[in-house]
Structure formats: C-alpha cells, structure tokens
Image: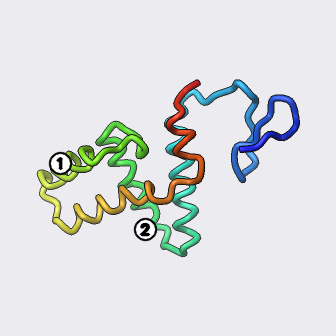
C-alpha cells in the first residue's frame, strides 16, 4: 500500500482501487476473504487450470469456511479435524476427504503479500 500524494487517498492494490482515509469496509473479514479467493482464482487461471477445476476448488473452500464459521487466516488444525470427522460420517470416500482437505488448505499457501497483516488487523 502506498500514498498517492493526494490528501486522504491510499492505493490498496494493483487493480487501482482507492480508499479515502478513515473509510472502512462494513465487513472487512468478508472483503478480505473475497479478495483472497479472487487472487487465488487468478493464480490458478495463470497456471492454465480448467475453469471447472478452479470453481470446484473455490466451492470446497467456501464449504469449509461455512463449516468452521471462521476465515482461512483463523483456521486451526482442530477445525480440519472436525471437518474431516464430519466428512467421514457422511460416508465420503477417503480419497475424496483427502482431496477436500488438500484443496481447502491451498489458499493458505498463496496468501498475497500483506493480506495476513490486513486480515489480522481487524476492524478499526
């Protein structure tokens, strides 16, 4: 993030989004999640993954967010264990469960620079 030199304006990202100083999101965690997922989708597309693969991966992450009631930067190993237990009780194949867990943790490995700091700073 850098200052534009204009009073009260701050550059937020490469997509040229500007924000007035002192203005904040109504739901900053949700905005951070959406920005994180958008960046992750862009990264996967740049690796030439098929659109249906990318869409399915995002759905798995959203399912885990809904299950845990937490955002990726708040997840703990215990959340993964509870989710895995829930998936086992649904009768899913072990390979499907391993795939879901691997997919759900992928976005945590590609966090954009500064995202973790922005997400942890919370509402102001």
Who's the residue at 17% across and 48% down the image? Answer: 86
Numbered disc 2: secondary structure? helix
Who's the residue at 87% across and 38% down the image? Answer: 5
Say whether residue 37 is left or right of residue 97.
right
Q: Nearer the viewer, mark 1 or mark 2?
A: 1
Residue 41 drawn at (x, y percent): 53, 60
Say whether residue 93 is left or right of residue 42.
left
Residue 6 drawn at (x, y percent): 88, 35
Query: Residue 97 appears in which quarter of the rendering?
Result: bottom left
Image quadrant containing the C terminus: top right
Say whether residue 122 is left or right of residue 25.
left
Residue 62 drawn at (x, y percent): 39, 48
Instruction: Measure the C-alpha gap from mark 1 to mark 2.
Output: 23 Å
Residue 11 drawn at (x, y percent): 75, 42
Identify the mark at residue 53; answer none if there is no mark: 2
- Mark 1 or mark 2: which comes first in sequence? 2
Residue beneath disc 1:
86
For label 1, the crowd category at 10 Å Cα-Cα, with few meaning under 14, some 14 to 19 and many 20 or more, is some
Numbered disc 1: secondary structure? helix
Query: Residue 106 appears in which quarter of the rendering?
Result: bottom left
Identify the mark at residue 110; answer none if there is no mark: none
Who's the residue at 29% across and 42% down the image? Answer: 67
Answer whether labels 1 and 2 touch (C-beta < 8 Å): no
The answer to whether 102 is drawn above or below residue 1 in the figure is below
């Amino acid at each position: 993030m850098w200052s534009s030199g204009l009073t009260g304006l701050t550059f937020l990202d490469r997509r040229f989004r500007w924000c007035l100083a002192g203005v904040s999101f109504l739901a900053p965690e949700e905005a951070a999640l959406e920005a994180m997922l958008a960046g992750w989708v862009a990264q996967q597309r740049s690796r030439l993954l098929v659109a249906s693969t990318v869409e399915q991966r995002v759905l798995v992450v959203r399912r885990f967010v809904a299950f845990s009631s937490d955002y990726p930067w708040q997840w703990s190993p215990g959340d993964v264990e509870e989710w895995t237990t829930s998936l086992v009780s649904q009768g899913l194949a072990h390979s499907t469960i391993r795939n879901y867990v691997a997919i759900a943790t992928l976005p945590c490995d590609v966090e954009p620079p500064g995202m973790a700091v922005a997400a942890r700073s919370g509402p102001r």
